[in-house]
Image: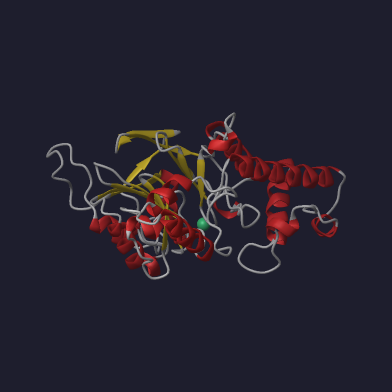
Amino acid sequence: MEGRRLLPAAAPQMKYQRTALRAPRVTAPVLWLAALVLIRLAVPDAWHVHAQNGAAPAGDVETVQIRPNVYVLFGAGGNITVHTGVDGAIVVDSGTAAMADAVLAAVQRLKSQPIRYVINTSADPDHVGGNAKLAAAGAAFNNNAQFIGAATAEVVAREEVLLRMSAPSGAQSPFPTAVWPTETFTQRVKSMYVNDDGVQIMHMPAAHSDGDSVVFFRRADVIATGDILDLRRFPMIDTERGGTVQGEIDALNSLLVLAIPPMPLVYREARTLLVPGHGRVADHAELVDYRDMVTVVRDIVEHAIKKGMSLPEIKASNPTAGFRAQYGSDTGPWTTEMFVEAVYNDLRGKRQ
Ligand SMILES: [Zn+2]
């Protein structure tokens, strides 16, 4: 995680901070104000969440409230979005298996039990690892016995996620069955109405992988994007598992259709919030920059291929110039070279 910065540049949480700061009885207003200013200066950005909810970090999981009933859990591998309300909790992604206990504790601290749904944005281990633990602690809606609930929460994902996590009979499955999705969908959008909110799980074909979904909470105006958006680095296009650069660009453009910038009343800071698969929460402007970046790199590599340049020549020509400082990395699981290679292989494959 990059430092303590978890929210877009100008945090839209000011009203929560003020709520948290309001003292029950102010006997000496000037002293109070001075003390509060000192506290605000001394404490890092996400402090107010714990102040308001009484929620302490669970293990290394940090909970940040981004809307009255929406929270983001950072530090569990992938980001986790939790939507709470009268019906129970909807949890988008479940972190790594190793962090499952800490994640469950953090969700339970939000006091919105039971967990009704766990939704997976992809089949990545750091997004599905906690599925079994979270589902076991929850209870799905049971239409036959309304609100009594089934024994576990439903784990929802696109069908491709289940196919990636399971295996043809006889072969060793990459994940134990307890972690697999229990409810898959094949349509473009799966919609439901939970916690007085319209919840839409939208498939983004062939982007980061072939099974990507984003989860749009319409009333809360929050979109959990999964790994389609990752402001820490170039997008991880997993060509081995059906990811493509064009699908990635299409997905970012689809998100841009849904995301609303703080216009025209910019001073209010009201806007759609995007919770990426990793890193801090983003907004429309950052999504535009990210979409432009992927599009420009795609165009440069495509042009180079048309000119007959080889992959080493393209790499040497530095096609990510201008973006490298912000998104590039020479080490770690997803380097600049790997990104350029993925774009090249994808475009090259399409030309053959
Ligand atoms: Zn991820």
Q: Quadrant of the N terminus?
A: bottom right
Residue positioned 68% across, 56% down in the render = 339
Foreground: 320 or 298?
A: 320
Residue positioned 31% across, 46% down in the render = 84
Percent position of residue 80, x then y:
42, 54
Q: Is residue 95 left or right of residue 152?
A: right
Q: Quadrant of the C terminus?
A: top right
Percent position of residue 60, x then y:
42, 69
Q: Is residue 98 above or below residue 22?
A: below
Q: Is residue 255 left or right of residue 99?
A: right
Q: Is residue 50 visible?
A: yes
Residue found at the far right of this picture: 307
Q: Is residue 127 visible?
A: no
Residue found at the far top of this picture: 264
Foreground: 320 or 30?
A: 30
Percent position of residue 291, x then y:
66, 42
State the count of labels.
0
Q: Is residue 264 left or right of residue 142?
A: right
Residue positioned 31% across, 53% down in the render = 25
Foreground: 327 or 244?
A: 327
Quadrant for residue 128, please give it: bottom left
